[in-house]
Each structure stands twice: as structure tokens, then as C-alpha cells.
């Protein structure tokens, strides 16, 4: 299963946290607000009831209340604040504000000296209900009188809804702000990783040899591990190549002595030749491309220039004209410098051996392929021989010195790079060897 | 022709010494890079054969140091390391050609002759001067198409003079190029070789192929 990116993981975690956090916060705050509002309402209604009690009088056993109460809300019909006085299961007084209201059902009053508060009392609409029972001296004894005050909940509900709407808006805004901040800080936190990633890609492409930028302490260890890996890979590759080169050296010097020995039977010459070719080809195959973990981008022109200079020196007597065309001029080869030199060197060497006066090397990028061709004006390679030179299954000892072993090594190397090798008739008259390599 | 061979394998060194001496070359031997550099800076060689894998100082460094010390003789690299990267490195450090081990003795001799010829500005194995023709490959000398029998030393003297036709070659220089370093130098021997050469090439004294410049040396007659 494909692993999610760090950015996506962190973002998903943040969204999840916000989805849980914002509604929970809203609910908690709403609850706290309602409770506080309800408490405050209870206190207000208690004060109202005390005002009523202070205005209440018994006169000859009859309830006496002023026509206009101090709180105007009690005097205005439909104001939302209503008061009732009840004695002996009878409503003995109602405030002017309840003029158009339905008859209040008989309520169970609290015990004398007690108060009760109902925060959701249904009387047509929804009301807060506060009740208090006090005892009054009627002259003939004590009479329990209950005061009921009802406050319409509409205003309260509107206030609650308003609060909830503000709360949702602001918390939504805060959540959005938090997301933006999170994205910004996430980007800032992931920036070094992205830089490291870019440098690793550059190292992969061979544009840099080491990861050198400064990184946060958490990534420094990774950076030094990658550099260590790159170092040891390079050293190992170099050790491997040198060991094989030393092996070739230690095998070939005694072989040279053997070959130069006087009075050696003439039929010993062929096996010696075969041993030599086996060493040449197998050791080159062993180092070809395999040890390479990351490709390096190699500029072709400087390498070609060196090889052409070498060819001019080696084939000075032939006065060859060796030209090259590279399109585009900065064209690169993805791979190891030793391998490129080996392939180009062998093909150029063959061409110089075969050429009469001219050798032409052309390098061009065609679609996803890099084409390197070397043509000469020599005798060419007969069509029937071309296939056998290119087939990789051909027995090693069937290669002839010069044309054969060089091309066999080239064929092995080209194949190690998933490339193709072809032989054509050149426009110059001789052979044209074409090496094709995938560009990516 | 005087050659210097630097090779660390004693068996191969002996073999090369024998091969080259048998083919008429004077040979000085070195089994490490430092000795080879000393020989190259002390003696005027016609060619140096240098193995890349030398102890003390490797072949690449030896060639670079020798070229810095104005050693101009052609250098043939002998190497078992046959990767092009190493060949190019060797040629860039100042060598003129390379030969990978193992090699045929004939190929080595052909390369030596070609390099000496090339250094003398002669691309072809035949050196012609008037009626005189010298084939550096077959080591044959003819005058007006007539074959002349020469001893190895007489051939060496004539070849050296013909490869340096514009130059006055002193007896010391001739001696150095014909004999090994251990040989006791005696300039009278050169006079004897030149005298014999004159008699064989020009028995009636009409050509005067080798001029004597008194107190300075010998030169091939420019009017031939």
C-alpha cells in the first residue's frame, strides 16, 4: 500500500482535530452560557418576587396590591413578564400584563419559605417560572401566599441563538486561521525535507557528489548517513575496479612472459590468446555498470575530446581526420565515466584502425534515446558478419583480435545500460557503429 | 638505437632486454619508477618503454616528471590495465603510444620502430637520401638498388645519422645511442664504424655520404 505523504497526514490529523474540537467547544460554551443565563434569570425573577412581596398587603383577609407596580413590565399587557398570587389553591391576583393571556393552571406552590425555579415551563409558550411562598399575618392567623412570576423565554432563546451564531462564526474563523497557520508552519517544517529531497535527486543524477547544505539537527543525521553511503559506495566501486585491474595486471604480466618465452610450441599460442581475451572480456564485464547505484550526468564532449586526442597520437602515422558533432552540444550520458570511455574508446579505436582518412563521431538525442555513432571510410563490415559480431551469445574465442574483442566488450557494456548496438554501412563508405542508450 | 625499459617484473624485464638486444638495440633497464626517471634524465634515449604499474613511482607520474625534465624521446606505455581511461591518462601524461600485455614480440618491435621513425619526422619505414635507402623494418640498406651488407653497429650508426639528417652528430652522441650505459666509451670505435660504412656505401669515393666536420662530428651529406 502506498504510504501517505507527511503533508497529507499532518493535514488530515489537523482537520480531524478541528472537526472534534470546534463542535465540542461550541457545545460546551453554549451549555455554560445557558446555565449562566438561567442562573441570572432566576436571580432576576427572585428580585421581582421580592418586589411583589414588598407591595403585597392583606387587608381584612383580602389581598391588596397597587394598581400600578413599580416594574413597568408587570403593567404592560403581553410584555412577557407575568405575575400571579395564589392562596388556598386559588389565584387571587394577576398582573395587568397577563390581561390577554390564557388562564394559568393551578400550580403546586413550594412550601412556605421555599422557592422553586423551572427553566422550561410550558404555558402556551415556553417560560421561566419562579415561585415563592411566604406566610402573612391576617390578624386571624397566618396565611400562606404563593407568588408566581413567569418570564417569556423568547428573548432568552433569541439571545441564545444569537450567541450560538456568533460562537460558530468566530470559532469557524479561528479554525480556518488555525488551518492556514498549520499549513504555513507545515510548509516551513517540511521545507528542509523538500530541500534534502532535491539534493538527493541531484546526487542521483550526478549533478552533485555530496549533500552539502545545512539542515535541522533532525535531518543532519540522515544527511551524514547518505553522504557516508555515497562515500562508501564510491570507495567500494573504486576498490572493486582497482582490484579487478590489479588482478588483470597480475595475470597478464606472467602471460606476457609466457608468450615471449623462446622455443614455446606454436600450438601454445592460441590457448594463450584465448586466456588473454577471457581475462580482457570477463574482467571488463565484471566492472561494467553493475557497481553503479546512481547515474551520473556526464558531459560527452570533454570525454570525446580526450579520446580523439589519444587516437590522433596513437594513429599519428595515418594522418586521420577525426570529426565529431554533438547535438545539443551540452548533451550528457547517464552513467559511469569509465564505461563511457571504454565504449567510445573501443569503437573509435576500431574505426581508426579501419579508416583510410576519415572518422566521424555523431552524438544526438532522439526522443528518449541517446544515439552515439562512429563511422569510418574503411572497408566496412560485411552484412553477414555484422549479426555474429553483435549477438551476445557468441563464443568468446570466435572473436578476432582487433574488431572482435573490442566490439564484444562494447556489446556487453551497451547491454548493461539497457541500450542497443547496431552496425550499418556508413555514408563515408566503411562501417557505422551505432550505440543507443535510454535517456531516462 | 638506445632504449630504456622500466618494468617491475624481473622475468619480463630480462625477456625484453634479450629481445631488444637481439634486435640491435642498446638497452638500459630500470625496475622502479625512480631509477627510470634517473636514467631518463641522465641519458639521451631514442625511446623509453614504461610499464604503468611500477613501484616507488607509477608510470603516469614517471612520464609526467620526465616530460617536466624536458625528456623528449618517444615513450611507449606497456600496461596490463587495458581500460581506455588508463590509456588516455597515459597518453595525456606525455606518452606517445601504448601496448597492452600480453603482446607479440613482433608487435612490440614494430611499435618501437614506428615511434622512433615518427620522432624523426618519418612516417614511412623507408628512409631515402639520394641513391641511399634504409628500410627501418627489414633493416636493409641499398645504394642505387644494390643491397649492402652491414654489421649491426654499422647499421645503427647509419640509421641514427639518417634519422637526424640536419644535425651534426658528435661521436659521444653516436656512442651513447649505440651502446648500453655500462659500455666503456671509446670514440675511436665510432671512427672505425664510419670508415667501414663509407667503404661499403661509397667504394669509389664519388658520393661522400657521411661528412666529417672536424672537432664537431658527422652529418649525412645534404647534397645527396
Image: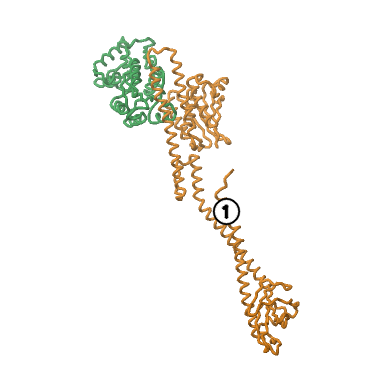
Residue A188, x across and y down, in percent:
51, 53
Quadrant (top left/top right/bottom left/bottom right) for the N terminus of chain A: top right
x, y percent for residue B64: 35, 31
The kind of secondary structure element at disc 1 is helix
Q: Residue at x 51, y 52 (%)?
A: A189
When the figure is inspected, residue B103 is found, relative to residue A84, above or below; the finding is above
Q: Residue at x 66, y 87 (%)?
A: A137
Residue sitting at 57 percent across and 19 percent down? A384
Q: Nearer the viewer, residue B218 or B96?
A: B96
Counting from the top left corner in percent of width and height, residue A3 is at 57, 45
Q: Is residue A96 visible?
A: no
Colour chain B appears in: green
The spot of residue A436 in percent (x, y) is 55, 31
Q: Which is more toward the observer, A288 or A164?
A: A164
Image colouring = by chain
Residue A408 is left or right of residue B5, and the answer is: right
Quadrant location of the C terminus of chain A? top right
Colour assignment, chain A = orange
Location of mark 1 (residue)? A13
Q: Is residue B20 left or right of residue A228?
A: left
Query: Is the residue marked by circle 1 packed among few (<14), some (14-19), or many (20+) residues within 10 Å?
Result: few
Which quadrant of the view contains residue B79?
Answer: top left
Residue B56 shows in the view: yes
Is residue A195 or residue B93 the one in the foreground? A195
Amino acid at each position: 500500500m502506498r504510504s501517505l505523504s507527511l503533508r497529507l497526514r499532518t493535514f488530515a490529523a489537523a482537520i480531524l482535530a478541528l472537526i472534534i474540537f470546534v463542535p465540542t467547544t461550541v457545545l460546551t460554551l453554549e451549555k455554560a452560557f445557558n446555565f449562566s443565563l438561567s442562573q441570572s434569570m432566576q436571580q432576576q425573577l427572585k428580585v421581582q418576587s421580592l418586589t411583589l412581596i414588598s407591595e403585597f398587603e392583606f387587608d381584612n383577609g383580602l389581598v391588596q396590591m397597587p394598581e400600578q407596580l413599580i416594574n413597568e413590565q408587570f403593567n404592560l399587557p403581553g410584555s412577557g413578564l407575568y405575575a400571579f398570587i395564589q392562596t388556598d389553591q386559588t389565584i387571587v391576583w394577576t398582573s395587568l400584563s397577563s390581561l390577554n393571556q390564557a388562564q394559568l393552571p393551578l400550580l403546586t406552590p413550594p412550601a412556605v419559605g421555599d422557592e422553586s425555579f423551572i427553566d422550561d415551563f410550558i404555558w402556551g409558550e415556553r417560560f421561566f417560572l419562579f415561585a415563592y411562598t411566604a406566610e402573612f399575618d391576617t390578624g386571624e392567623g397566618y396565611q400562606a401566599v404563593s407568588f408566581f412570576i413567569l418570564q417569556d423565554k423568547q428573548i432568552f432563546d433569541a439571545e441564545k441563538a444569537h450567541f450560538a451564531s456568533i460562537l460558530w462564526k468566530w470559532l469557524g474563523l479561528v479554525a480556518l486561521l488555525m488551518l492556514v497557520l498549520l499549513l504555513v508552519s507545515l510548509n516551513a517544517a517540511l521545507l528542509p525535507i523538500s530541500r534534502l529531497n532535491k539534493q538527493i535527486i541531484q546526487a542521483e543524477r550526478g549533478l552533485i557528489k555530496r549533500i552539502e547544505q545545512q539542515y535541522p539537527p533532525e535531518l543532519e543525521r540522515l544527511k551524514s548517513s547518505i553522504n557516508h553511503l555515497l562515500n562508501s559506495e564510491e570507495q567500494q566501486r573504486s576498490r572493486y575496479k582497482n582490484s579487478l585491474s590489479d588482478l588483470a595486471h597480475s595475470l597478464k604480466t606472467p602471460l606476457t612472459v609466457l608468450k615471449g618465452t623462446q622455443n614455446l610450441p606454436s600450438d601454445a599460442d592460441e590457448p594463450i590468446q584465448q586466456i588473454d581475451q577471457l581475462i580482457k572480456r570477463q574482467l571488463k564485464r565484471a566492472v561494467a555498470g553493475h557497481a553503479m547505484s546512481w547515474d551520473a550526468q556526464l558531459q560527452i564532449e570533454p570525454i570525446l575530446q580526450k579520446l580523439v586526442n589519444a587516437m590522433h597520437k596513437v594513429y599519428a602515422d595515418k594522418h586521420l581526420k577525426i570529426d565529431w558533432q554533438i547535438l545539443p552540444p551540452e548533451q550528457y550520458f547517464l552513467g559511469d565515466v569509465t564505461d563511457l570511455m571504454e565504449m567510445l574508446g573501443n569503437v573509435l579505436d576500431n574505426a581508426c584502425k579501419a579508416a583510410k582518412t576519415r572518422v566521424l563521431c555523431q552524438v544526438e538525442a532522439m526522443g528518449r534515446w541517446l544515439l552515439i555513432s562512429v563511422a569510418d571510410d574503411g572497408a566496412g563490415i560485411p552484412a553477414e558478419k555484422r549479426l555474429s559480431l553483435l549477438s551476445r551469445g557468441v563464443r568468446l574465442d570466435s572473436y578476432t583480435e582487433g574488431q572482435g574483442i573490442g566490439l564484444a566488450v562494447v556489446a556487453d557494456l551497451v547491454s548493461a545500460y539497457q541500450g542497443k548496438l547496431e552496425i550499418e554501412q556508413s555514408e563515408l563508405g566503411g562501417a557505422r557503429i551505432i550505440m543507443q542508450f535510454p535517456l531516462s | 638505437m638506445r632504449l630504456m625499459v622500466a618494468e617491475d617484473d624481473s622475468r619480463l624485464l630480462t625477456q625484453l632486454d634479450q629481445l631488444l638486444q637481439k634486435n640491435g638495440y642498446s638497452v638500459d633497464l630500470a625496475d622502479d619508477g625512480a631509477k627510470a626517471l634517473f636514467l631518463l634524465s641522465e641519458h639521451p634515449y631514442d625511446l623509453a618503454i614504461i610499464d604503468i604499474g611500477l613501484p616507488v613511482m607509477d608510470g603516469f607520474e614517471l612520464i609526467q616528471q620526465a616530460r617536466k625534465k624536458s625528456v623528449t624521446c618517444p615513450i611507449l606505455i606497456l600496461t596490463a590495465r587495458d581500460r581506455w581511461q588508463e590509456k588516455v591518462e597515459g597518453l595525456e601524461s606525455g606518452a606517445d603510444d601504448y601496448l597492452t600485455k600480453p603482446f607479440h614480440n613482433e608487435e612490440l618491435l614494430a611499435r618501437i620502430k614506428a615511434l622512433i621513425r615518427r620522432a624523426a619526422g618519418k612516417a614511412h619505414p623507408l628512409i631515402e637520401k639520394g641513391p641511399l635507402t634504409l628500410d627501418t623494418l627489414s633493416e636493409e640498406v641499398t645504394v642505387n638498388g644494390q643491397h649492402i651488407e652491414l654489421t649491426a653497429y654499422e647499421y645503427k650508426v647509419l640509421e641514427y645519422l639518417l634519422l637526424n639528417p640536419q644535425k651534426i652528430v658528435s661521436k659521444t652522441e653516436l656512442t651513447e645511442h649505440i651502446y648500453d650505459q655500462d659500455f666503456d666509451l671509446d670514440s675511436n670505435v665510432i671512427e672505425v664504424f664510419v670508415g667501414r660504412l663509407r667503404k661499403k656505401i661509397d667504394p669509389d669515393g664519388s658520393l661522400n655520404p657521411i661528412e666529417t666536420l672536424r672537432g664537431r662530428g658527422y652529418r649525412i651529406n645534404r647534397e645527396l
